[in-house]
């Protein structure tokens, strides 16, 4: 479904991604893990068109998207929930969800019902300004907002960041649920243990290079991973 | 009676400031830049209207429409040529570019229309209203200006609240990156914002010159600066703020001129701005953003 082939991304002179290739197949949950500054967010931003690669190519649903403008990718079925949620803090929960259906206005009503079913906490706060939501609620809102475009592939950048363990569990089970309902997921996480548990496959990124890949189970059992990311 | 007369004049002048301030505030809110060339678009609008009526003998209302069309195009071109390439540049570079564009417009006007003042004839053709046995005269220009200001305010508020483009503008104003990820064409949204601001500038130019009929290439600069002040005064980025700031500024200016000193009127205006910003740095209706990390 998504094929990333040998991309090199720079911030000015900083060479952030050094020849990354990865692929995501329909129906999978693929995790991308790595330490701070490894280039995980950069990878997602390049896929969603916010950054450009100098080399190689990116294709989504057999179409080359390496030069497609970011705003055109949403309608093609690619959603990106960015690091730090980036909800529209001055808009209400409802307005945020409406923005999510910007390219697909016919889905506003059904989409909102669906989101409220998945995230009942949002329903009770639907007229509240997003800036007054808790971190966990904002994460739910960001995911709900992305769901409003009925994406085929959802890319999530550190959805568990800054959340209490119980909320993390909840977010991960929602991701699994979304996936079972048919959304393919590319998941970036620092929380490697949790991510590997729900992932079909995973890639490990280190200073802009892919150093390991395998199924979630394989990586969970690997000594290198245990040492570097799972605290022993 | 003179008090009421001054008050009406103040509201009327303030309405012009408010219409100009809307352009500043929208562009600032959405593109996060101060378009210091905005005042000069006003002047161009007035010249276009002047030419359409004087040289082509067109109906004054039609001349306003033409001025709006020309200024809309001008706004889009300025944004596309001068500002768009600087989208990721430091704010200072954009600011200096805007000042450059401002001088470019003034000097182009000087080249095209010369330095001799043009005598702008009012686009309003009905008579002034005389009340209280002729003691209080409300000029027809004042009436038209205030009505135009109210209509624009309501239309713009509805547009931003209800229309798809308006919602896109609010999203872009909050977070360009997130807006892009929602599928919003951020560049187009910014262009439309410039287009609307410039069309309003044309209206403001015509109204301003209808009330104060001397038209020269620098006609737009002082009102431009004052409208910018009004936008900051009301809370930059806020549409009702631009309105309130503009009208208050107009009233303060006219009262300062009438009761204190006509030389000091402008100084008083800016002094009030400084005091307001000291007390409330976000301006009268400026939003305090509560961010959660
Ligand atoms: N806007 C930028 N300008 C310059 N360098 C940047 C920029 N954004 C990221 N980088 C650099 O690129 C590298 C990869 O950053 P990236 O944000 O992709 O890391 P990450 O894996 O997402 O880290 P984290 O887990 O902390 O979010 C880092 O070395 C970072 O310093
Ligand atoms: Mg990151």
Image: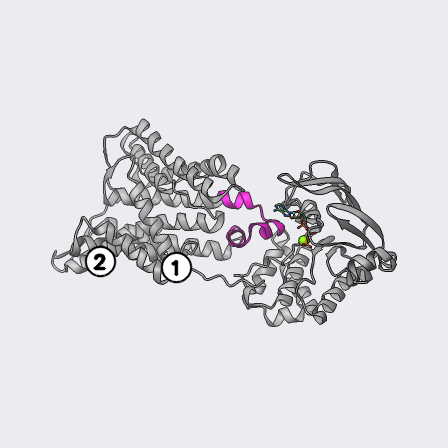
In this view of the protein, can residue A1 be seen by the observer?
no
Q: Nearer the viewer, residue B87 or B76?
A: B87
Residue A51 percent location from the top left of the image: 65, 43
Left/right placement of residue B285 relative to residue A193 reads: left
Tell me which residue sits at (49%, 37%) in the image.
B80
Q: Quadrant of the C terminus of chain A?
A: bottom right
Left/right placement of residue B12 relative to residue A150 reads: left
The residue wearing badge 1 is: B281
Q: Nearer the viewer, residue A71 or A189?
A: A189
Which range is magenta? B165-191
Tell me which residue sits at (26%, 35%) in the image.
B216
Say whether mark 1 is within 8 Å of ligand 1: no
Q: Nearer the viewer, mark 2 or mark 1?
A: 1
Bin the neighbour count of mark 2 within 10 Å (Cα to Cα): few under 14, some 14-19, many 20 and up. some
Position of B105 relative to B252 (above/below):
above
Where disc 2 sits, the SS reads: helix
- Does the magenta portion include B181? yes
Distance, label 2 to label 1, CA atoms, is: 27 Å
Q: Earlier in the sequence, mark 2 or mark 1?
A: 2
Q: How is the image coloured?
A: one colour
Chain label for disc 2:
B
Q: Nearer the viewer, residue A37 or A80?
A: A37
- As drawn, the label of residue B7 is 2
- Does the magenta portion include B235? no
């Amino acid at each position: 479904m998504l094929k990333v082939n040998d991309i090199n991304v720079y911030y000015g002179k900083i060479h952030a991604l050094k020849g990354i290739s990865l692929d995501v197949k329909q129906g999978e949950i693929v995790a991308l893990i790595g330490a701070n500054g490894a280039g995980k967010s950069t990878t997602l931003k390049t896929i969603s068109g916010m950054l450009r690669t100098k080399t190689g190519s990116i294709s989504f649903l057999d179409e080359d998207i390496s030069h497609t403008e970011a705003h055109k990718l949403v309608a093609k079925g690619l959603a990106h929930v960015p690091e730090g949620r980036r909800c529209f803090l001055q808009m209400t929960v409802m307005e945020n969800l409406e923005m999510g259906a910007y390219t697909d206005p016919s889905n506003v009503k059904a989409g909102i019902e669906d989101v409220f079913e998945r995230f009942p906490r949002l329903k009770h706060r639907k007229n509240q300004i997003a800036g007054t939501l808790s971190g966990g609620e904002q994460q739910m809102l960001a995911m709900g907002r992305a769901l409003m475009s009925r994406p085929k592939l959802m890319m999530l950048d550190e959805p568990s960041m800054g959340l209490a363990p119980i909320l993390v569990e909840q977010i991960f089970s929602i991701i699994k649920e979304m996936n079972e309902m048919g959304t393919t997921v590319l998941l970036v996480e620092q929380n490697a243990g949790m991510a590997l548990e729900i992932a079909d496959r995973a890639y490990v990124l280190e200073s802009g290079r892919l150093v390991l890949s395998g199924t979630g189970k394989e990586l969970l059992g690997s000594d290198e991973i245990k040492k570097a990311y799972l605290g022993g | 009676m003179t008090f009421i007369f001054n008050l009406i004049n103040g509201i009327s002048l303030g309405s012009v400031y408010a219409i100009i301030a809307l352009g500043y505030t929208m562009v600032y809110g959405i593109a996060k830049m101060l378009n210091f060339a905005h005042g000069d678009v006003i002047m161009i609008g007035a010249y276009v209207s002047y030419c359409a009526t004087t040289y082509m003998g067109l109906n004054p209302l039609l001349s306003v429409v033409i001025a709006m069309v020309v200024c809309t195009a001008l706004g889009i071109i300025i944004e596309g040529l001068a500002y768009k390439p600087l989208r990721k540049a430091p704010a200072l570079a954009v600011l200096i570019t805007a000042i450059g564009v401002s001088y470019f417009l003034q000097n182009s006007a000087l080249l095209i229309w010369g330095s001799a003042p043009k005598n702008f004839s009012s686009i309003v053709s009905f008579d002034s209203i005389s009340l209280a046995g002729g003691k209080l005269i409300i000029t027809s220009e004042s009436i038209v200006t205030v009505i135009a200001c109210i209509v624009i305010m309501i239309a713009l508020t509805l547009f931003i609240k209800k229309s798809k483009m308006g919602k896109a503008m609010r999203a872009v104003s909050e977070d360009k990156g997130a807006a892009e990820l929602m599928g919003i064409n951020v560049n187009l949204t910014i262009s439309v914002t410039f287009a609307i601001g410039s069309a309003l500038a044309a209206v403001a130019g015509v109204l301003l010159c209808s009330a104060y009929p001397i038209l020269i290439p620098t006609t737009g600069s002082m009102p431009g600066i004052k409208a910018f002040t009004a936008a900051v005064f009301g809370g930059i980025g806020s549409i009702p703020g631009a309105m309130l700031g503009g009208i208050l500024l107009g009233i303060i200016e006219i009262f300062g001129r009438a009761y204190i000193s006509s030389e000091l009127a402008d100084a008083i205006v800016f002094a009030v701005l400084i005091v307001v910003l000291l007390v409330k740095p976000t301006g009268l209706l400026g939003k305090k953003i509560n961010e959660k990390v």
